[in-house]
Image: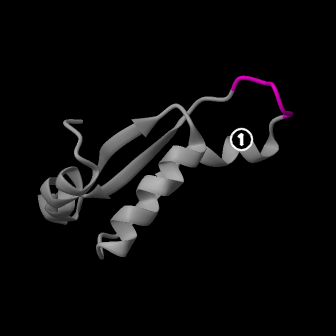
């Protein structure tokens, strides 16, 4: 596997909803990506603190994804 095929974190979101909005923007731009850690919110009672969610992209798409999300992560 080359470095361009490695998954890297593009962002961390305290709010799972924000992570899925960002995921949608990346996918609309044709960038394969995934949210991890976000499903915990589906199984946790309302009002319980839940860790946020991270978005992963391939290394080869990192710069383009940063431009889309306008982040410096």
Colour convention: one colour
Quadrant position of residue 28: bottom left
The vertical placement of 4 against 18, above or below, is: below
Left or right relative to 39: residue 34: left
Compare residues 40 and 20 and report the one nearer the observer: 20
Quadrant occupied by the C terminus: top left
Left or right relative to 24: residue 6: left
The vertical placement of 40 against 66, above or below, is: above
Q: Residue at coordinates 24% horizontally, 57% vertically from top-left?
A: 68
Residue occupied by mark 1? 41
Q: Residues within 10 Å of mark 1 (few under 14, many from 20)?
A: some
Tell whether position 57 is magenta. no
Q: Residue at coordinates 23% horizontally, 40% vertically from top-left?
A: 71
How many dots with numbers?
Answer: 1
Position in image of residue 67 (x %, y %): 17, 53
Quadrant occupied by the N terminus: bottom left
Q: Main secondary structure of the magenta part?
A: loop
Segment colored magenta: 45-49
Mark 1, secondary structure of its residue: helix
Residue farthest right in this picture: 45
Q: Residue at coordinates 35% horizontally, 41% vertically from top-left?
A: 11
Compare residues 30 and 6 and report the one nearer the observer: 30
Q: Residue at coordinates 79% horizontally, 24% vertically from top-left?
A: 48
Position in image of residue 39 (x %, y %): 66, 48
Position in image of residue 32 (x %, y %): 34, 70
Quadrant position of residue 44: top right
């Amino acid at each position: 596997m080359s470095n361009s095929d490695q998954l890297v974190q593009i962002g961390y979101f305290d709010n799972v909803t924000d992570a899925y909005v960002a995921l949608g923007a990346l996918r609309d731009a044709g960038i394969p990506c995934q949210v991890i850690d976000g499903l915990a919110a589906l199984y946790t009672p309302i009002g319980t603190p839940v860790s946020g969610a991270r978005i992963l992209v391939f290394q080869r798409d990192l710069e383009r994804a940063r431009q889309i999300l306008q982040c410096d992560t």
